[in-house]
Amino acid sequence: MALNQEFVGRSFPPSPVYQVGREKIREFASAIGDSNPVFHDPAAAAALGYADIIAPPTFAIIVSLQAVTGVAHDPALGLDYSRVVHGDQRFVYARPICAGDELVVTATIESARTVAGNDMLSARADVATTAGEHVVTTYSTIVARAAEEAGA
Amino acid sequence: MIPAFADIEVGFELPAQQFAITRADLVRYCGASGDFNVIHWNERVATSVGLPDVIAHGMFTMAEAVRVVTDWLGDPGALVDYGCRFTRPVVVPDDDRGALLSVTAKVTEKRDDNTVLITISASSDDSTVLGKAQAVVRLP
């Protein structure tokens, strides 16, 4: 099924504010088994010059993918979300996400294409503080794999 | 201490690491990340959409792989760019051992702006699972 090309280039209104909590960072770091003290201990983070504990590099996905998957679920796009896997992912950091940050995400659909029956949606998410400071930009491609009966 | 730019040469190998990934880890990651895609915890649904079994979140694999870089750095804030393709899924069987992810990384380029390019290799069950996995770090 071809993706709706009208989505390409579309930007979406900034997300609701995401308040980065210390315990959420600790929960995420623990879930990936990462005991680096800078993710858990404010004193260790302060020793490296941070205002509070910082988040592991891939924490940004929590904030950004929500904005992207919101779009992916839009029936008008034509993506079969039941067959979706993550195709690629990139983060470009201005600085680490830090506990206490208030973040907003602006998502933009960069491409929607079909390759060998697989629908591929690429989106950029610009993550900034409510004060307008750029923190990280994420680039994500999600892929709805072709159904077997389509001959993939 | 963050490694000094002057001390690092192209070809330098970061300490390799291995990570065990069990079904329990995936369930925990679902909760922590908010990604509850059923293919990461339900074998019936995973196989019904053509997957061999439950697979790890690509983002979970990506999170583990970069620990080779951030553990070496000490300060994860020195990471300025990190990306990869999810070329093969990490299949996580329903047993107590789960899957084993092996990660190596080496410096493949030194740049003028005190950054170095690190190429990461991640494999599970003798297959490479991440493609073009690269990190850029800024060193003092």
Image (cartoon, rainbow, N blue to C red):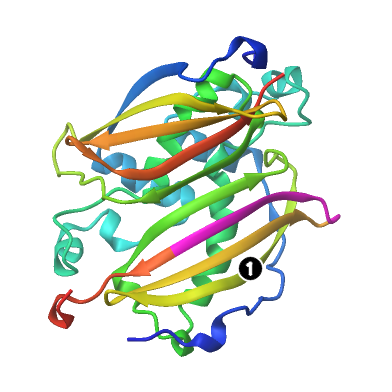
Percent x, y of residue A69: 49, 69
Residue at (50% x, 60% y) in the render: A140
Q: Give how far across and how far down residue B50 sits, in percent.
A: 16, 66
Q: Is residue A4 left or right of residue B25?
A: right
Give residue B29's quadrant in the image: top left
Residue A32 makes an appearance in the image: no
Which quadrant of the figure contains the N terminus of chain A? bottom left
Left or right side of B21 for B97:
left
The spot of residue B61 in percent (x, y) is 37, 41
Look at the picture and state if A13 lies above or below A19: below
Is A140 covered by the magenta stretch?
yes
**Residue B5: in magenta span:** no
- In front: B103, or B131? B131
Of all chains, the one bearing label 1 is: A
Report the magenta residues as a range.
Answer: A131-141
Q: Is residue B81 left or right of residue B107?
A: right
Query: Taken as a whole, is the magenta stretch helix, strand or loop?
Result: strand
Residue that numbered label 1 is attached to: A107
Amino acid tagged 1: Ala
